[in-house]
Image (cartoon, grey):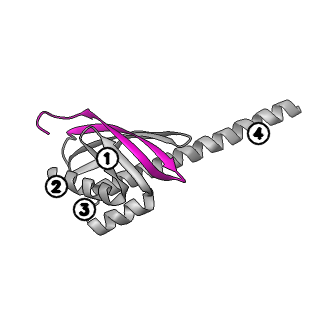
Amino acid sequence: MTTSTPETSNTSTSTSTSNVAAAAAADAAAKAAEQYIAAWNETDAARRLDLLQAGWTEDARYIDPMAKAEGRTQIAALIEGVQQRFPGFRFKLKGTPDAHGEHLRFSWMLGPEGAQDLIEGTDFARLAAGKLQAVTGFLDKVPVGA
């Protein structure tokens, strides 16, 4: 029979609470990244705006080496422009999203559906109440001429 001292019990509870918090953060990170990818893949403008309203704050901002957008309407227009430039391409998550507090990091791939992905990137985001508030994108792999 094992007895637990108050110190052992508190450590166990603290570790358990920490594990639950880490799991919740991982779930929130995955959900935010999946919503982000869904918005970039949505070709219907009204549904895309619905996704942005559900997953992004009203004052959301997006920036990468090629574009900058402020607010859901500009972000929706930016996404539409990317879809026009790369018709038939789809975004997919690469690896597992990672979060620390209100900060989120995830990588993605972009390419024609059913073919090799041509473009890869990593995005860093700040969340507010579980919604994307600011996203900074980096392009990790871009073919010449893209």
In the image: residue 13, left or right of residue 4: left
> Residue 138 at x, y = what percent?
31, 36
Q: Find disc 2 in the rendering and name its residue.
A: 84
Magenta stretch in the rendered image: 118-146
Q: Which residue occupies the foreground of this view, 41 or 6?
A: 41
Q: Which amino acid lies under the numbered mark 1 shown in the image of this protein?
A: Lys
Q: Is residue 16 left or right of residue 125?
A: right
- Say which element carries label 4: helix
Q: Are marks 3 and 2 in contact (CB under 8 Å)?
A: no
Label 4, on which residue? 13
Discs 3/1, front = 3
Q: Which residue occupies 49% across, 48% down?
A: 127
Q: Is residue 130 visible?
A: yes
Q: Give the x, y percent position of residue 8.
A: 82, 31
Compared to residue 57, the image places residue 110 above or below, namely above
In primary-sequence order, the first of circles 4 and 1 is: 4
Residue 101 position, x and y percent, is 56, 41
The answer to the question of whether label 1 and label 2 lie on touching residues, with beta carbons closer than 8 A, is no
Q: Residues within 10 Å of mark 4 (few under 14, many from 20)?
A: few
Q: Which marked residue is nearer to the observer: mark 2 or mark 4?
A: 2
Amino acid type, residue under disc 4 in the picture: Thr
- At 88% from the left and 31% from the top, the residue drawn is 5
Residue at left offset 25%, top offset 62%: 43
Q: Is residue 33 left or right of residue 89?
A: right
Q: Secondary structure at mark 2?
A: helix
Q: Which residue is mark 1?
A: 92
Instruction: Residue type at mark 3: give it.
Output: Thr
Location of mark 3 (residue): 43
First reached walking from the N terminus: tag 1 or tag 2: 2
